[in-house]
């Protein structure tokens, strides 16, 4: 049996930077995320049977795995999309000082 990862990286995308900023600020203020990075990107995807191309913001959310359910609830509640992308990736290892900072800045 493998041990559960203490930390995770959660990604989501939104169409407008103002939405990304609002979600990021809520997650950090509630100490559900130690850090949220917002990056502009271009996405291609299928929606309603059509190939679409849109500008989006990719959000990289650094958090504790134990907080994932609450974090995902906040994202889903604030997210403008009908079906928001919310994907969790376990962090197997990392810079010890950075992980300690994450531990100290989240609930």
Image (spheres, rainbow, N blue to C red):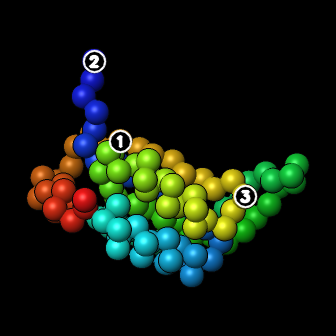
Residue 73 relative to residue 80: left or right:
left
Q: Which residue is labeled 3 in the image?
A: 82
Contact check, label 2 and label 1, Cβ < 8 Å: no
Mark 3, secondary structure of its residue:
loop
Query: Where's residue 62, x and y in %?
Result: 34, 58
- The image shows residue 90, relative to residue 11, as above or below, that is above
Can residue 40 be seen here? The reply is: no
- 1 vs 3, front mark: 3
C-alpha distance separating marks 2 and 1: 16 Å
Can residue 47 be seen here? The reply is: yes
Mark 1, secondary structure of its residue:
strand
Quadrant location of the N terminus?
A: top left
Q: Residue placed at 35% from the left, 61% from the top?
A: 32
Quadrant location of the C terminus?
A: bottom left
Label whose residue precedes the other's in the sequence (3 or 2): 2
Looking at the image, which is closer to me, 79 or 38? 79
Q: Crowding near pointer 1: few (<14 within 10 Å), some, many (20+)?
A: some
Residue 2 relative to residue 20: left or right:
left
Q: Which residue is labeled 2 in the image?
A: 1
C-alpha distance separating marks 3 and 2: 36 Å
Looking at the image, which is closer to me, 13 or 30? 30
Picture quadrant of residue 53: bottom right
Mark 2, secondary structure of its residue:
loop
Label whose residue precedes the other's in the sequence (2 or 1): 2
Q: Which mark, residue 90?
A: 1
For this orientation, the residue located farthest to the right is 49
Query: Where's residue 90, x and y in %?
Result: 35, 41
Label whose residue precedes the other's in the sequence (1 or 3): 3
Q: Residue placed at 58% from the left, 76% from the top?
A: 19
- The image shows residue 12, relative to residue 41, as above or below, that is above
């Amino acid at each position: 049996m493998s041990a559960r990862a203490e930390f995770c990286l959660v990604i989501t995308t939104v169409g407008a930077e103002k939405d990304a900023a609002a979600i990021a600020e809520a997650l950090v203020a509630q100490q559900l995320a130690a850090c949220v990075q917002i990056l502009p990107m271009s996405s291609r995807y299928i929606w309603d049977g059509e190939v679409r191309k849109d500008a989006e913001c990719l959000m990289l959310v650094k958090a504790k795995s134990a907080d994932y359910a609450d974090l995902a609830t906040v994202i889903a509640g604030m997210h403008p999309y009908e079906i928001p992308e919310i994907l969790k990736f376990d962090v197997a290892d990392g810079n010890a000082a950075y992980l300690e900072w994450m531990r100290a800045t989240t609930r």
